[in-house]
Amino acid sequence: MTVIESPQTGVAKKADTGIIDCDIHPLPKNAKSLHPYLPKRWQEHAEHFGGHLRQPFIHTTQYPRSAPLICRRDAWPPSGGPPGSDLDFMREQHLDPFNIINGILIPLFSNVASERNLDYANALATAHNDWQVSEWLDKEPRLRGTLVVSQDDPAAAVKEIERCARDKRFVQIMLAPRSSEPLGRQRYWPIFEAAEAHDLPLGIHSYGVGGNASTAGGWPSFYMDEHYATTMGGPATMSSMVLEGVLERFPKLRVVLVEIGFAWVPSFMWRMDRLWERMRGEIPHLVHPPSHYVKRNFWYTTQPMEEPSRPNDLRRTFDWVGWDKLLFSTDYPHWDQDDPAYAFNVKLTPAERRQICRENAEGFYRF
Amino acid sequence: MLQPLVSEKKIDCDIHITLPSTAKLVPYLDDYWREQVTTRGIDRLELTSDISNIGPAIRPDWKLGADVQTIQNAVLDRFGTDIAICNCMYGAQAVYNADLAVALCRAMNDWMADEFLSKDERLRGSVVLPWQHPQKAAEEIERRAADRRFVQVSLLAGGDTPLGRRALWPIYAAAEAHGFAVGIQAGTAYRFAPWTNGWPSYHIEDQVSQSVGIQSQLLSMITEGVFEEFPKLKVVLTDSGVTWLPPFLWRIDKLWRGLRMEVPWLKRSPSEIVSQHVRMTLQPFDGPDDAQLVQELVEQIGEHMLLFSTDYPRWNFDGADAAPLKGQPELMRKLRTENPFETYARLREDLT
């Protein structure tokens, strides 16, 4: 009889030097949790009108997903409230057992980046940032914040960056790749200027409702298509920022693509280079081949980890993307989160593991 | 000249012929449409998304293949080609008036047969489809089925609706019934933005987007169950780029494992489906300069997946060596002969 040991999920190995988790999603306990951080006018707006997005449904995403709130079923806190809303439970279920020495919060819940009412979006952005400070960063020193801005109002976004940047616990500025226009277009450049000036990276997390079809071929039927299409906001944004010249103008800008995958990058880089060889006359502002900017300015979080059937293909992908470009992330508490014990479908040396799970993020976020 | 044995035939699975003007179609239109296109000046419907219309993307020693002599000189004779499959792209596939699309596509296929297929026996055709009206598109497939020189039907990577949508299934039913491969060419009618985040500033960005557009279309065909419904169907991705395939399959296999409840008709993993039903033309390969690395990528992709192509007249390579694979005659034979015969049922049946 074969005895299968139960998996030691969530149990950190003694030798583990700790993990930096670059993608944790907090949620508010209820619909009024942000009210203390909103002016009265916007509290009333939230209650009477609510958000205004470019999508058919008021309360849910365009495609029915795989689980309520896209979350793990065991992540609902015993205290009540949705997954990711209870700090104690997050410590108990996630931060402590995985030996997470730093976790980066990425609040997605109000679709601030996609809100059509820009004044409301600006109020929400400020509320998200103050809420992060009071409810999370002040209470748990392992956590770091992500600066939420209203990207379609770049002047206001810059003001919000100026307001928050002195709190060093904010380690990045979040933008949605599924923007209402490609992010490399010049209307967004004031945000990049502020990011570079404050040495704050851009955390471009897979999300957003920009109003364009999910794919160039239109609206597919299934969440499975939509999930893939969302991640293709990554190449969309990379192509735009590289080819429209953002990284020529702001050479020190650091961009991390979060929850967008990384295995697509080598092929995509080669494709951009090949087309640039022929069509560079159209974009003379680009002094170097596109791959130059990709290699210099882009990083990637790991979840959802690629799982090639031949494990060595993953190792080769790391070679091509760059071992120094990968930042470990779990996506807690979402349904497709990666468990650090099982995420890598290939054997890594302790040094390689430490590099991806900790050191790269320490360098990238200047911890 | 003696024909080489079937097992030695060199097949180029993607060359592009160019319809220079609607005027060429006038002889093939009925009275109503002849008058319409003439009096209204319905002409110059070249597609914005067709890279053949971007001068620097055309090989300097080539020009557009608007007549058979140009193609003979530039590609057929020079590459020792025994068979070349022609693709053609024009506004017929993008006009919003479905009746006009039907008339123009039918005329384009007549024109292709008269001006190319009848003038050089090495040429084979891809049937241009008025996919704006799927039922009429299926009728066009029926109409061409008796002409064995047409071996493929042709769709673009972007049209009215994702390619897996059931409204388009009459096209796949007709293609399967008559043994046509379904070719999906890079190119879009711009019903939707090239990227999920909208309309970029530059042509090059649209061109970069095409490989992702094709990925989404392939995924749509998989998830909707096209290959379960039409088990003999072959899809050929032309000008799609090649090297994106392995990471795409890793990703969608993983998605399928997590989300198969949503698409319960898929009994096999997406990578198994693709391996059986989908092939890609070789150019553009979108690879690195390093030959060793190219070899490694071909192993990842699978030799059986690739069909030799020059992608004439687009500029993907210099000289007369179209393959990024050096010194591998056996592999080249597979790409030029064995894989195409396995893919194009009508070609196989016609020549054996």
Image: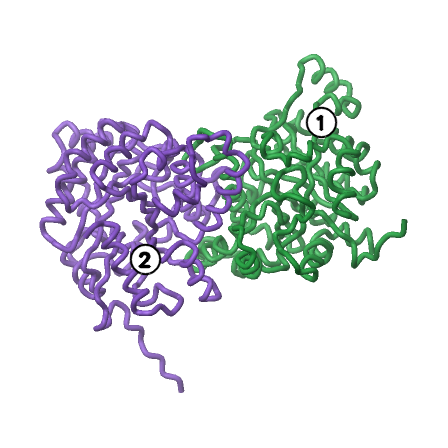
Left or right: A194 as drawn, with respect to A178:
left
Q: Is residue B57 above or below residue B24?
A: below
> The residue under label 2 is which amino acid type?
Gln
| Residue name at image x 22 percent, y 41 percent | A199
Local crowd size for mark 1, using a 10 Å CA cut-off: few (<14), some (14–19), many (≥20) = some
Label 2 chain ID: A
Q: Residue A140 at x, y = what percent?
A: 12, 54
Residue furthest right as drawn: B1
Of residues B47 and B329, the one nearer the viewer is: B329
The residue sitting at 40% across, 58% down in the picture is A318
Most extreme residue toward the bottom is A1
**Residue B179 point in image, percent of width and height:** 73, 50
* Cα–Cα span, label 2 and label 1: 52 Å
Q: Is residue A229 visible?
A: yes
Q: Which chain is green?
A: B
Quadrant for residue A287, please give it. Answer: top left
Q: Which residue is mark 2?
A: A337
Q: Do the CB atoms of the residues marked 2 and 1 lie less than 8 Å apart?
A: no
Tags 2 and 1 both on a single chain? no
Circle 1: element type: helix
The disc at residue B103 is 1
**Figure chain in purple:** A
Classify residue A82 as left or right of residue B297. Answer: left
Tally the numbered discs.
2
Q: Residue at x 28, y 72 (%)?
A: A8
- In this orientation, does residue B169 appear? no
**Viewer-proximal residue, A80 or A102?**
A102
- Horizontal and vertical percent for residue B315? 62, 39
For the residue pair A154 and B26, the one nearer the viewer reads as A154
x, y percentage for residue A363? 24, 53
